[in-house]
Image (cartoon, rainbow, N blue to C red):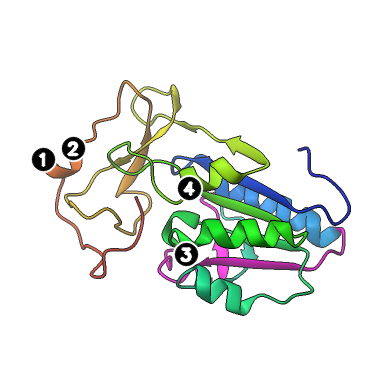
Amino acid sequence: MNFAKGNLGWIEVICGPMFSGKSEELIRRLRRAEIARQRVQIFKPAIDQRFAEDHIVSHSALKIRSASVKDAAELEAALDLRTEVIGIDESQFLGNGLVDLVVRLADLGKRIIIAGLDTDYLGRPFHPVPDLLAVADEITKTLAICMQCGNPAKHTQRLVVSDELIVVGAGGMYEARCRRCFEPNLARETAPTSTRASNGTGAP
């Protein structure tokens, strides 16, 4: 990590597919900031209630307390001006306004650590994460293990039928796939039906 010390603003983006350790890495960095006695605030999208309402929880069961917000505007309203480090998980669910917000916060000298999916269930760029990558000072690309062949995986494979961009889910609804094993049309053709997010928001 090349994080600059002092009051120089800094944007760190951790991106990759599901099951690649993004939330775990986010939690690790935030815990180090807390150990350093920095003022830390942590946020996640209100729609993500898969594991806990008031914690970010990784697939490996690491967790850290967080506040739930519906979008970038609500996140900004919840910020304490004294906060030095801001953590944001599942950033793909917070809207394009997040990009402008994190740039302004970095300009104010804040360190912002963001985790999110960079591609959706069809393998397309999942905004606003690509835009966050463009303004980031540091980028970490995580890879998972393909659940079909064991090779490094960069894709999130949806296993349930839905044309919605966002459907909340975890194991059983999604798995990591490598480029060769990824089947973007599988969710439209062969998988069993599942409950959709009624408001069009959730996982990839």
Cβ atoms under marks 4 and 2 closer than 8 Å: no
Of marks 3 and 1, which one's residue comes earlier in the chain?
3
Q: Amino acid at mark 3?
A: Phe
Residue on which the image places disc 4:
129
Q: Earlier in the sequence, mark 4 or mark 2?
A: 4
Give the CA distance from mark 2 to mark 1.
5 Å
Q: Earlier in the sequence, mark 3 or mark 4?
A: 3
Q: Residues within 10 Å of mark 1 (few under 14, many from 20)?
A: few
Front residue of this view, candidates 172 and 138: 138
Instruction: Name the quadrant containing residue 135.
Output: top right
Residue 150 lies left or right of residue 136; in this view the side is left
Q: CA distance from mark 2 to mark 3?
A: 26 Å
**Is residue 40 positioned above or below 155 on the image?**
below
**Residue type at mark 4?**
Val
2 vs 3, front mark: 2
Q: Residue at x 38, y 52 (%)?
A: 170
Judging by the rendered image, the residue that carries numbered circle 1 is: 189
Q: Nearer the viewer, residue 70 or 103?
A: 103
